[in-house]
Image: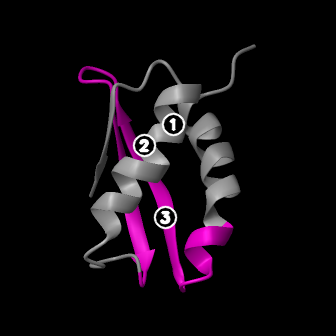
Amino acid sequence: MSLSIEHRVNEILDNLRPYLQEDDGDVEYVRFEEDTRTLVLRFLGNCDGCPLSMMTLRGGIERFILKDIPEVRRVEKE
């Protein structure tokens, strides 16, 4: 049985969360849009509205997700 996309994303996020939480931030899974293969995440705490959040998304989170979950083509923030 293969694990759901949500489960696999959350496993990756669990490994990245401690770094975000050091700055009182966090991230959570919102949805996976199968038709566009887009994963949507929500930033929480200090990450929500942070000017560096897109850099965190593209340079960090998205890189790990695209490497480990081939079904995901891109990652966007809500």
Residue at image coords 60%, 28%: 4
Query: What amino acid is labelled 2 in the image?
Result: Glu
Sequence-earlier tag: 3 or 2? 3
| Horizontal side of residue 5 vs 52, given as left or right | right
Residue at image coords 55%, 38%: 6
Q: Quadrant of residue 52?
A: bottom left
Q: Secondary structure at mark 2?
A: helix
- Residue denoted by label 2: 62
Residue at image coords 27%, 79%: 49
Q: Which residues are magenta?
A: 18-46
Classed neighbour count for the residue bearing mark 3: other residues with Cα under 10 Å, few (<14), some (14–19), many (≥20): many
Looking at the picture, how far across and down is residue 63, in whole percent? 46, 39
Q: Farthest top residue?
A: 1
Q: Is residue 28 above or below residue 22?
A: above
Query: Quick check: marks 1 and 2 in contact, CB under 8 Å?
Result: yes
Q: Is residue 7 above or below residue 78?
A: above
Whole-Å distance between the Cαs marked 1 and 2?
5 Å
Q: Nearer the viewer, residue 76 or 61?
A: 61
Sequence-earlier tag: 3 or 1? 3
Q: Secondary structure at mark 3?
A: strand
- Residue denoted by label 1: 65
- Residue denoted by label 3: 27
Q: Secondary structure at mark 1?
A: helix
Query: What amino acid is labelled 3 in the image?
Result: Val
| Horizontal side of residue 5 vs 55, given as left or right | right
Q: Quadrant of the C terminus?
A: bottom left
Whole-Å distance between the Cαs marked 3 and 1?
13 Å
Query: Quick check: marks 3 and 2 in contact, CB under 8 Å?
Result: no
The residue mark sitting in front, 3 or 2, is 2
